[in-house]
Image: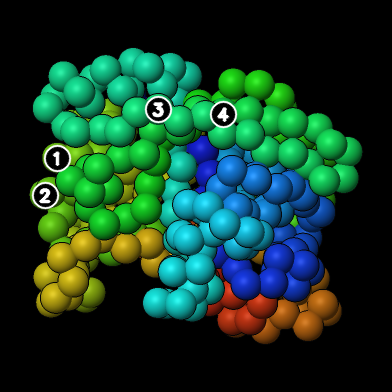
């Protein structure tokens, strides 16, 4: 039913400030600087090989502005949502209705790039709480206009979202939705003894949704936690970040075999951020 992890949304207060910080983190320029009048938002988009990252700020009144404002008021800036892509949103709607879920009508969206006045259009299907499990998520089908591709990724830049981390207190319930309803491939289901936690890996368009079950968590809702970004050379990326004044930990071996990792500790707008290289 879902074909891609279409994009990640990060809520920010000052869009220009966030743009400058994430240009340093990613080592590339954004491909879109837009507004969405009906949602009351403004956005900056960085495009990668397998998904895109949207920096989102309030810019007026509307459901989007309310989402950003309320999220920042409650928890501060940070990653707030994920959009799942589909090639046929009508089929997604019909399937969920047949399964007995109450889903709202499909809505139309439109964004305008303030730089060149180009327009993109899409359709959204916002999901009920029983499917989002408290996590802001929705289904999107792009219908008109093109998000420009990144022209070039150099060795010291980020080129791919490796994985997104979600916390849950009910791994089985998560599987029931993401595998059985959304039809996303479950690639790993394992108990990590030294964490005393169960870990799930779902795979979608060369991106991993990493789910960590924390039974001691009293929160009954799932929550987005952090992002892991991949580049061609973690060593080159580390040097570039350090030169640009971004605080980053030393490079070390990752928990996953044949990986190197480092943690970005500044400029992330409250998003736990990992660099990773598969060697």
Q: Residues within 10 Å of mark 2 (few under 14, many from 20)?
A: few
Measured in 3D between alpha carbons, the distance from the residue under mark 2 to the one under mark 4, in whole angstroms, is 32 Å
Q: Quadrant of residue 198?
A: bottom left
Residue at point 41% right, 21% down? 89
Relative to 201, residue 216 above or below:
below
The residue identified by callout 4 is 122
Vertical relation: 128 (above or below) 166: above
Q: Which quadrant of the figure contains the N terminus?
A: top left
Tell me what residue is drawn at x 52 percent, y 29 percent.
Answer: 108
To which quarter of the image does residue 276 belong?
bottom right
Q: CA distance from mark 3 to mark 2?
A: 29 Å
Which one is earlier in the sequence, the residue at label 3 or at label 2? 3
User: Which residue ends up furthest to the right in the rendered image?
Assistant: 116
Picture colour scheme? rainbow
- Mark pair 3, 1: CA separation: 24 Å
| Circle 3 residue | 106
Asked if marks 1 and 2 touch (Cβ < 8 Å), the reply is yes
Q: Quickly name the residue at label 1.
A: 176
| Of residues 178 and 15, the one drawn nearer to the viewer in this rendering | 15
Residue shown at 18% from the left, 46% from the top: 130
Q: Position of residue 252 (x, y in %)?
A: 54, 74
Q: Dot 3 surroundings within 10 Å: few (below 14), some, or many (20 or more)?
A: some
Q: Cα distance, mark 1 to mark 4?
A: 28 Å
Quick one: label 1 or label 4, which is nearer the N terminus? 4
Answer with mark 3 or mark 1, whichever residue precedes in sequence. 3
Residue position marked by numbered label 2 in the rendering: 172
Mark 1, secondary structure of its residue: helix
């Amino acid at each position: 039913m879902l074909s891609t992890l279409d994009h990640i949304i990060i809520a920010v207060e000052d869009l220009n400030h966030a743009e400058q910080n994430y240009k340093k983190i990613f080592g590339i320029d954004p491909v879109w600087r837009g507004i969405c009048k009906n949602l009351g938002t403004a956005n900056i988009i960085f495009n990668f090989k397998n998904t895109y990252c949207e920096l989102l700020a309030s810019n007026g009144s509307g459901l989007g502005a309310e989402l950003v404002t309320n999220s920042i008021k409650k928890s501060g800036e940070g990653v707030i949502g994920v959009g799942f892509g589909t090639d046929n949103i009508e089929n997604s709607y019909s399937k969920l209705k047949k399964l007995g879920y109450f889903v709202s009508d499909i809505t139309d969206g439109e964004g305008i790039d303030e730089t060149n006045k180009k327009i993109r259009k899409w359709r959204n299907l916002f999901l009920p709480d029983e499917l989002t499990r408290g996590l802001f998520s929705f289904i999107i089908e792009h219908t008109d206009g093109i998000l420009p591709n990144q022209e070039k990724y150099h060795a010291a830049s980020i080129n791919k979202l490796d994985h997104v981390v979600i916390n849950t207190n009910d791994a089985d319930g998560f599987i029931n939705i993401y595998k059985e309803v959304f039809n996303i491939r479950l690639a790993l289901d394992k108990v990590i003894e030294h964490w005393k936690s169960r870990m799930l890996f779902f795979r979608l368009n060369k991106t991993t949704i990493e789910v960590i079950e924390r039974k001691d968590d009293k929160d009954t809702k799932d929550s987005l936690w952090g992002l892991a970004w991949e580049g061609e050379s973690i060593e080159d990326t580390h040097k570039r970040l350090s030169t640009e004044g971004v605080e980053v930990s030393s490079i070390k071996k990752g928990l996953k075999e044949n990986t190197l990792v480092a943690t970005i500790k500044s400029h992330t707008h409250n998003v736990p951020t990992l660099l990773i290289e598969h060697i």
